């Protein structure tokens, strides 16, 4: 199989760097083009990530892939999609609104930006949960917009662990209410400026603007069904409180649900353990061996010890127990790696699925 | 008014030290006796808090009160209650089961231990919420047990912010369900050994043994009504997830309630702001000027900036908004200082109330 | 005594806010004018510190002084010095180069900026150490520059604890070498953007640009003597490594010195304890009761427990012991509050000294 | 080659667990026996690491090696050395004094304990620096003590980075003084109780009992030469200040040296880069590809980003520059992973060297 040639937009930012790491030595995909702002354009990547003082601005634990170092950075606003098979977009929302449709005219665009998440003909792609179910929308999108490509945004990083953990419960017991409190890692806020140390050491920030609305809307849409005019969101209301805590990576969520049918912890654990993601059997390179890891130790999951499970692609669940305050109530804690499954690596998994489906 | 002579049990531990700080220069109370384990007994306090290597084991930000320094530490197991007007008990649960009844035979015992919290004739004293309502139980306790004194334990530090914030909502709108996720400061776990740094830096511990059961039972009891055989707990179920985060002091709670009557955020804020604690008008030295501080800024309350409001005696509420996942639903964030209102200072406020009531 | 009318430049930034807190309810000084960038100008202070979303950008633990709330913020670039007795400047270096001379033409300017620190006719004012010794330069400055006022910058916050602790050693034993490693709190880096949480949690940053050069040059100048053409720096070389650690406030320094004469720890401790600052006896409102606090407990000083000693105006010293690697060697650890004595409060102490000297 | 059968003493503690991780799937060594305290003895390992409440007490990021799970834990005090080729000892000092000689009668003992570090016939084994030079002492030890085996302790984890970085400088320029300030990670203090979170969040502890003396003595001994009666320590005095900071893993040291010969940063960097460890060419499984990694970026090394270089076996050096306060002065920052090269993995590297030398 010929390797697909990928462009990464926003390649010098933290999210773009995560794409470069996720795509390094990928068996099916190779990064051949890099897009960034005008300021970075025209220099080889290794130089584009130096600041004015010559210090390197690179924020991943992994070193920059050597094969990228000499690639020239292009001005994303003027890149030509010729010779590109797929675009990974890691730009800010405003830039995404401009750039993503331009590329989607020619090629598939897989994005971590929220710009298109709430369009009726655009699914929010969450591998394991709704890739198979919502992929038919791609054709609707192409037809309606006259594109050869399409746009597939992934969910907000906080939605990821919630929606993946809800899916097996929904299938087994039905779902009538969801309440959730998140304790989110600081890498979810990006890096420039991101969360200031003075704000978070010995502290909690009890508010993340727009996050709760995103989680509620996206969870409903991801768990929804394909109807006539697009996706019909699942009707269970989602009440969220999203907070920021002094954790580097990993979003921890305390979840309570009201199921439609009686739902014991044992049955819920069986549902989690038996969850078969929609990419199962496709042998995708980034698919986690266990999509949901269930902990019996009540002190787990913990972000520092569990966020890297299955290379950061697993969703870790623990403390599964009855929720006394809800009918058919169930409570649990869920942890997901916000910059792995919750960002670039999750998007690469989407791309792998598209390869298998012949859409890439 | 003659100052009441107070004994502090567990005086060398972190909770006992907080009592010493809370009682320093108190206008109505003075510490005249110190009890601790056999190991510490027989030495002046200033020496009893030195470890084998001569380093001082003192954990409050305030210095040890100078008037305490020369007081001899007695073996709590063999202290004579003569000449003591009130005992403040900061010992561990097992020790409390032994010691508190011995002292209660003669004098009032105000305690941060959980040993007697769940006895039917013992109220869990939370100033502002149930001092007036549940104080008649003291007579029942005396009669039933043949004591001259009585035992008044305070609630678990996590219950404090929850129950105080629920009280005005209960009074105004009724209460049918409570769901809560706590993010608790590490000082709540004490100091020897307390929380190990390796466990909490860049991490969350999603489980605190027995905490959720305590919060549920205590909240129900505190909000309950006095019935024939003791307190009839309030019937609203309380579903809690209690977690530990990298915050030094302050317990932050994300709360969702289902009210019996419609309850807008505006009406809830009015109820919080209008809350009149049961100690109002008594001019107690440790009473907070504002028992509940309501924040409009959605980024507040934050533990580092708000835990010390009203000298750590206020309950700070913010992010008051509808809970979409519950009927008559309301959501908010509440913060309380776990070692101030949630421990020794709260107990001293109880003692001040008892003074005014002629019970001390 | 009529209160001096003070203007604060950079009033909306973190350093300016610290000035407002330091000047609140000051017995001799009152803030009557506020200067900031064009962007903030024209609004009352309470509104000038709201961001676009209405959230308050205020970073001190203390609330904004109420008497400031309604004061209009002026464009610092176009403020008229009429009616101002003293200017406190908390602007960035580039702005300071422009603004401070404009004001100094008319009134004294006391500054936390580095813009004028290295001019030969400008002393770096460190209360206790060189106010008396270097103040004659003010007249040189006035004459040479034709100003009615003058500029008095304070030292870099890292220099403060070093120079104060060196002064009694220099006086008692002479000084031939200084080696220092700092572990600096993050508030020293300001707030926009300051230190990013992703950079400092579970981490150390071993480099602070220009800091080591500043510390070396400023320490030499502060400890220097007044000569013909200005200050002759003390010749002892200062070798510094400046690092940033996950501490909110307080700069901790491990210092080694080679003295000219033999210097035992006991003699050094006596010198620290006997230190008589040059403002002694003047009864200045912000003067610390003990300018240097010496700890016997080898586990002290610690930033969290000791930075607020004497309201953040003390320099705390501990671990005084021989330095085996230097002749007449002495080692110790010193802690100073970088945003109290090391910034606005230190500058206010300078102003108080000037009041007593009739220069304000 | 037959795999050597290894026993791990102290197998249930954090240091012992690190040995199990370091030895998992080792090509030359296999763990066949586990020793611990009487309390843990008699149970399979997987059960011996459960606490009373059933929670697992395992502190490595890696999972417990599956081949260990069913191995029975023996009482270390009564283990028979039959069938053991080598003992890895991770017990506390007092236990080490008892146990290590018992085993050394029969087999080589490689230890992280300090019990035998300061005996004249015992080298402190630091791979790369003194394995070859000091190994002849093993024969002295055997003869003098009548043992078939021997004891080889590794250095204190803080000594490791210092001594490795000094070695190439000593060889190239000679060494007359060393001054060092350490900022040590909390995992260096072990885990029960280790560093309490209340002590280290937003704080620095400026003292680690006995650490400075250990670093001074051990560095001198490691860099010393073999003389008649044992090792003659290198005479350069080492003045250390050892502090604890809020970093999980990794010890960062700010080092200043006075060399005997002029020593430019460029020449020093060349010496670091050209360093040829004494195990070079032996192809040892745990040998780092680059023993010393030199950083040009002045913001490096940082513990979070660099501690895992070369699987935690590299010593990272940065900020190499002149030390103005010393003659022929050089300054740099060095980082070493305290629980990798500085503990179990370093000891395993010693074992690998012994295998190649025919001593195991």
Image: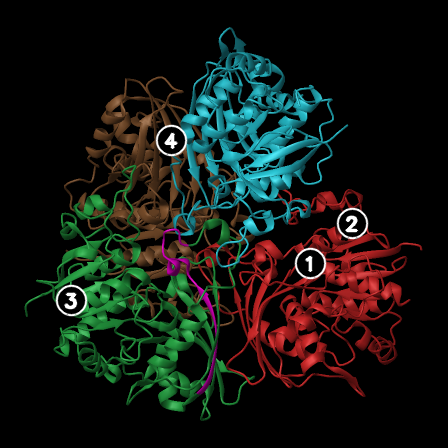
Chain colours: A brown, B cyan, C red, D green
Would residue C105 appear left or right of B298 to someone viewing this image? right
Disc 3 residue crowd, few under 14, some 14–19, many 20+, Cα 10 Å? many
Q: Are marks 4 and 3 in contact (CB under 8 Å)?
A: no
Label 1 – label 4 distance at C-alpha: 43 Å
Q: Where does the image place residue D116, in percent across and percent down from the top left?
A: 30, 71
Label 2 – label 3 distance at C-alpha: 70 Å
- Write down the chain letter for disc 1: C
- Write down the chain letter for disc 2: C
Q: Where does the image place residue A188, in percent across and percent down from the top left?
A: 43, 47
* Name of the residue lying farthest toward the left: D2
- Up/down of A322 relative to C341, above or below: above
Would residue D111 appear left or right of C34 to someone viewing this image? left
Query: Which residue is labeled 4 in the image?
Result: A255
Secondary structure beneath label 2:
loop
Q: Where does the image place residue D261, in percent across and percent down from the top left?
A: 44, 93
| Camera-nearest label, 1 or 3 | 3
Query: Which residue is labeled 3 in the image?
Result: D86
Secondary structure beneath label 3:
strand
* Name of the residue lying farthest toward the right: C1
Q: Are marks 1 and 3 in contact (CB under 8 Å)?
A: no
| Camera-nearest label, 4 or 3 | 3
Label 2 – label 1 distance at C-alpha: 14 Å
Query: Which residue is labeled 2 in the image?
Result: C24
């Amino acid at each position: 199989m010929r390797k697909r040639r990928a462009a990464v937009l926003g390649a010098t930012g933290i999210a773009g760097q995560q794409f470069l790491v996720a795509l390094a030595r990928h068996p099916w995909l190779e990064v051949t083009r890099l897009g960034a702002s005008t300021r970075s354009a025209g220099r080889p990547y290794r130089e584009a990530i130096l600041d004015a003082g010559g210090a390197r601005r690179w924020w991943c634990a992994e070193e920059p892939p050597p094969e990228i170092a000499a690639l020239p950075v292009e001005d994303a606003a003027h890149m030509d999609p010729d010779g590109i098979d797929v675009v990974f977009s890691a730009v800010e929302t405003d830039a995404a609104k401009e750039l993503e449709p331009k590329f989607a005219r020619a090629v598939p665009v897989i994005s971590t930006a929220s710009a298109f998440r709430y369009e009726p003909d655009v699914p929010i792609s969450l591998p394991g949960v709704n890739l198979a179910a919502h992929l038919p929308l791609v054709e609707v999108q192409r037809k309606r917009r006259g594109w050869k490509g399409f746009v597939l945004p992934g969910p907000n990083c906080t939605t990821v662990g919630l929606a993946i953990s809800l899916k097996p419960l929904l299938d087994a017991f039905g779902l009538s209410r969801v309440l959730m409190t998140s304790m989110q890692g600081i890498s979810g806020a990006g890096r420039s400026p991101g969360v200031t140390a003075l704000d978070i050491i010995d502290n909690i920030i009890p508010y993340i603007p727009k996050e709760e609305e995103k989680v509620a809307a996206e969870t409903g849409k991801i768990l929804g069904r394909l109807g006539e005019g697009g996706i019909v969101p699942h009707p269970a209301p989602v009440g969220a409180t999203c907070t920021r805590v002094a954790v580097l990576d990993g979003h921890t969520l305390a979840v309570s649900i009201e199921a439609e049918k009686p739902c014991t912890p044992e049955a819920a654990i069986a549902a989690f353990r038996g969850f078969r993601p929609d990419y199962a059997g496709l042998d995708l390179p980034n698919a986690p061996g266990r999509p949901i890891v269930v902990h019996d130790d009540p002190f787990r999951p913990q972000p520092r010890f569990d966020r890297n499970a299955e290379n950061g692609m697993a969703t870790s669940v623990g403390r599964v127990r009855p929720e006394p305050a809800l009918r058919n109530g169930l409570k649990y804690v869920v942890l997901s790696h916000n910059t792995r499954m919750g960002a670039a690596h999750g998007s690469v998994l989407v791309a792998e699925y598209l390869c298998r489906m012949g859409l890439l």
